Amino acid sequence: MKKIIILSGAGMSAESGVKTFRDSDGLWNNYRFEEVASPIAWERDPDLVLEFYNQRRKQLFEVEPNDAHKALVRLESKYDVQIITQNVDDLHERAGSKNVLHLHGELKKARSTADESLVYTLDHWELKRGDLCEKGSQLRPHIVWFGESVPNISLAASIASEADIFIVIGTSLFVYPAASLVHYVSEDVPKYLVDPKADLNNVRNLTTIKKKAGEAIPELVEELLNQS
Ligand code: APR
């Protein structure tokens, strides 16, 4: 089976009602990421950080996968599909995608501040001060904050290098190292970029689709299923 590797960003979940970061109504228009998504922020005001992620987690329990998430699942009938996502939501998984690698963490998980190998799945939206790990230390959001390393990036790079087809969906390609993944894909491999504001140059064998994911991905999936 041919390998299709997907790199998704916030635009993938926009039509589910999840805010992106850098669109006009994006999260970073209402918050400074230094105040809610960095180790310094956590030291300075852990309650503000917990509240920022609680609000996003609360919404996640109320939204559903959209047509783009669901279309990617259909690809699995004829391709070996691996999703690499910058998103911390679980919409790919809830749509039924089997192979999802999170680069920036997962909103529905929390981890120990004393031992980062202790990761817990949350079945409720609120994570509070006093919610402790089994070693008695405060739990924090299981999110890669600005300034922290991206543990899964080398695995993601090796996955990208194996792509027979590479599809980038709904990301401004603004944040590294995630944005560098497209350069691990062989030059002769067909690549697709789906984003209404797509603007990517100096990448060979690239087809740009300036549409929303909810419209473009079902069409692209149909085309790829007919090709195989
Ligand atoms: N369909 C497809 N693309 C869309 C849609 C849509 N319906 N709506 C918006 N987009 C596009 C925007 O044009 C933009 O290029 O999605 C992209 C969203 O970009 P960002 O808001 O920067 O989100 P993302 O690229 O995922 O951010 C990367 O930055 O803040 C950090 O850790 C955070 O993972 C995040 C990372």
Image (cartoon, rainbow, N blue to C red):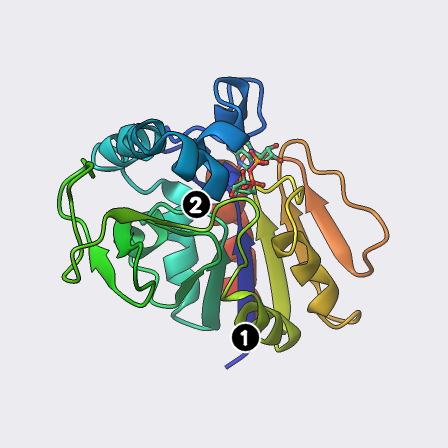
Distance in Å between CA atoms under marks 1 and 2: 19 Å
Residue 226 appears in the figure: no
Q: Is residue 149 above or below residue 56?
A: below
- Disc sitting over residue 3 in the figure: 1
* Classed neighbour count for the residue bearing mark 1: other residues with Cα under 10 Å, few (<14), some (14–19), many (≥20): some
| Residue 37 relative to residue 7: left or right | left
| Residue 68 relative to residue 155: left or right | left
Residue 176 appears in the figure: yes
Q: Secondary structure at mark 2?
A: helix
Mark before the other along the chain sequence, 1 or 2: 1
What residue did someone put label 2 on? 68
Q: Residue at x 70, y 69 (%)?
A: 185
* Classed neighbour count for the residue bearing mark 2: other residues with Cα under 10 Å, few (<14), some (14–19), many (≥20): many
Q: Residue at x 26, y 32 (%)?
A: 54
- The quadrant of the picture showing ligand 1 is top right
Q: Is residue 19 above or below residue 108?
A: above
Whole-percent x, y for residue 121 in the image: 20, 55
Q: Is residue 138 above or below residue 205?
A: above
Looking at this view, is 184 or 164 the one in front? Answer: 184
Whole-percent x, y for residue 89 in the image: 35, 45
